[in-house]
Image: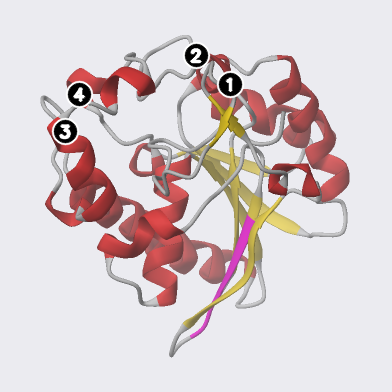
């Protein structure tokens, strides 16, 4: 089957302000995010992309715009099933504030049991995203052949859940996976199994530098995943 290139959107204003954006409208790329998006056509220059499929949210559409501008003939589609997780009442709130919510420990340790108040469950999030990928795999292969390559631009938790599915991991382990802004993950699907051939590739090793966490300047040793995805290298 086809090869899927998963791109997380570039760094957004919500990422840098420590806010869980969710589906809040008007969340745009910040200056670094725009630079990341501008570099995307060069990073993908060697790939014969058959189609580009994007979450309908602004930060994803801004991420793919330089790529689609550079390849004016490429098929471009919006796909609601790879939209951000519906975090419900958590949307728009500070991550530091959410860390005190009792549900956060469930999100971290047992995400398959987590349902966001007024939003969706993480199981439902993964199921719709996996269904979308399977459907687009079939469509792209039928239209462009079994060696076709296509791109999806989506969000951190969506990408992590798709990687977990491809690796045969239970959703409860998906917080062990990380995807920086504008990172590239590639999954090659075959009749018998998927192969994860790239994971969170940014070409920038700066994101591996130990981080400081909070005003106290202490290194982050909590071991907790950033819900929605982190902000990447400074």
User: Against 174, is 193 above or below?
Assistant: below
Q: What element carries label 1?
A: loop
Q: Is mark 2 on a helix, strand or loop?
A: loop
Residue appearing at x 66%, y 68% in the figure: 148
Work out how far the residue at label 4 is from the one at label 2, CA to CA, in angstroms.
Answer: 16 Å
Quarter assignment of residue 28:
top right
Residue appearing at x 59%, y 34% in the figure: 9
Local packing at callout 3 (Cα closer than 10 Å; few below 14, some 14-19, many 20+) is some
Chief secondary structure of the magenta span?
strand
Residue appearing at x 80%, y 25% in the figure: 35
Of the two numbered discs 4 and 2 on the same chain, state the one appearing first in sequence: 2
Residue designated by label 2: 27
Mark number displayed over residue 88? 4
Is 45 on the left-hand or right-hand side of 189?
Answer: right
Q: Is mark 4 on a helix, strand or loop?
A: helix
Residue 222 in picture, x, y percent from top left:
42, 43
Work out how far the residue at label 3 is from the one at label 2, CA to CA, in angstroms.
Answer: 20 Å
Local packing at callout 1 (Cα closer than 10 Å; few below 14, some 14-19, many 20+) is many
Q: Is the Cβ of the residue at disc 1 closer than 8 Å to that at disc 2?
A: yes
Relative depth, front residue between 130 and 181 = 181
Residue 227 in picture, x, y percent from top left:
38, 37
């Amino acid at each position: 089957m086809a090869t899927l290139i998963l791109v997380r959107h570039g760094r957004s204003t919500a990422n840098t302000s420590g806010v869980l954006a969710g589906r809040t409208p008007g969340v745009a790329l910040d200056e670094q995010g725009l630079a990341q998006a501008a570099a995307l056509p060069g990073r993908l220059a060697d790939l014969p992309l058959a189609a580009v499929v994007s979450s309908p949210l602004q930060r994803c559409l801004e991420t793919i715009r330089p790529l689609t501008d550079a390849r004016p003939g490429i098929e471009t589609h919006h796909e609601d099933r790879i939209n951000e997780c519906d975090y419900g009442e958590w949307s728009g709130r500070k991550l530091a504030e959410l860390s005190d919510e009792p549900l956060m420990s469930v999100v971290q340790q047992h995400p398959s049991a987590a349902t966001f108040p007024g939003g969706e469950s993480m199981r439902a999030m993964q199921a719709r995203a996996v269904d979308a990928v399977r459907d687009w795999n079939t469509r792209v292969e039928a239209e462009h052949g079994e060696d076709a390559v296509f791109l999806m631009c989506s969000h951190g938790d969506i990408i992590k859940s798709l990687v977990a599915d491809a690796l045969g991991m239970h959703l409860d382990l998906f917080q062990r996976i990380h995807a920086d802004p504008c990172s590239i993950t590639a999954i090659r699907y075959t009749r018998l199994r998927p192969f994860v051939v790239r994971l969170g590739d940014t070409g920038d090793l700066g994101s591996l530098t130990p981080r400081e966490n909070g005003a106290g300047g202490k290194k982050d040793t909590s071991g907790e995943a950033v819900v929605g995805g982190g902000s990447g290298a400074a």
